[in-house]
Amino acid sequence: MSTYNAIRYNNPYTNAGSLILLSTQTASASTSISFTSGIDSTYKEYLFIFNNLHPATDGTPLLFNLSTDNGSNYNVTKTTTYFYAQHSESGTGASLAYDTGSDVAQSTGYARIAESTGADNDQVSSGYLHLFEPSSSTYVKHFISCFNCYQSGDYSLASYSAGYGNTVSPINSIDFKFSSGNIDDGTIQMFGVVS
């Protein structure tokens, strides 16, 4: 395992002393990327860093779900909120919007964390998802995420999502996928956050 100095992770939501690299997964025409080990009571926070995820299908958002049974089922009940800012390559279409259609309310389905990434050769999404105290047997499981994608309509689109898994059962697995088609390329790293 590698240790990363906290200066690499200048996130206002944590006072991390360091990040411990637990796992790296690289997509290659992958249906999804799952982390089914390493999420336990060792750390109170986990950070997932997404580097250049490229979809096989044009205009597909990135989704995630959680599991309490080591990945046998990804169906944790979630409530989330979602908003984005965008600006086009042509210099038009700048906007900031709360996207009610991307929220979920007490849903066991997959939740959106990044917008509709394009499938052109140079179009990707990058960002992070921060999961708080997944092993708690007392509290719900909060998360926040931030992504920027090269959107299918040639926009730079920054998306922000937050919410909670509404369960007091420990979370021990997490799954990421595009809403349609494979993840052609890109990496996801999982870090334990040392407070």
Image: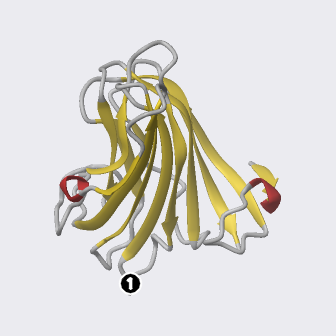
Task: Report helix, strand or loop for mark 1.
Answer: loop
Q: Which residue: 46% across, 73% down?
A: 135
In the depicted view, which residue is nearer to us: 81 or 67?
A: 81
Quadrant of the rendering where the C terminus is positioned: bottom right
Q: Which residue: 79% across, 69% down?
A: 17
Rendering coords of residue 64 (x, y %): 34, 49
Is 79 rendered above or below residue 75?
below
Is 61 rendered above or below residue 164?
above
Choose top left, top right, bottom left or bottom right for residue 18: bottom right
In the depicted view, which residue is nearer to us: 53 or 173?
A: 53
* Three-letter code for the amino acid on which mark 1 is drawn: Tyr
Rendering coords of residue 118 (x, y %): 38, 24
**Mark 1, residue position:** 139
Q: Residue furthest bottom?
A: 138
Q: Which residue: 25% across, 35% down?
A: 179
Rendering coords of residue 38 (x, y %): 54, 55
Q: Residue furthest top?
A: 121
Q: Residues within 10 Å of mark 1 (few under 14, many from 20)?
A: some
Choose top left, top right, bottom left or bottom right for residue 30: top left
Rendering coords of residue 57 (x, y %): 30, 20
The answer to whether one can see residue 26 in this image is: no
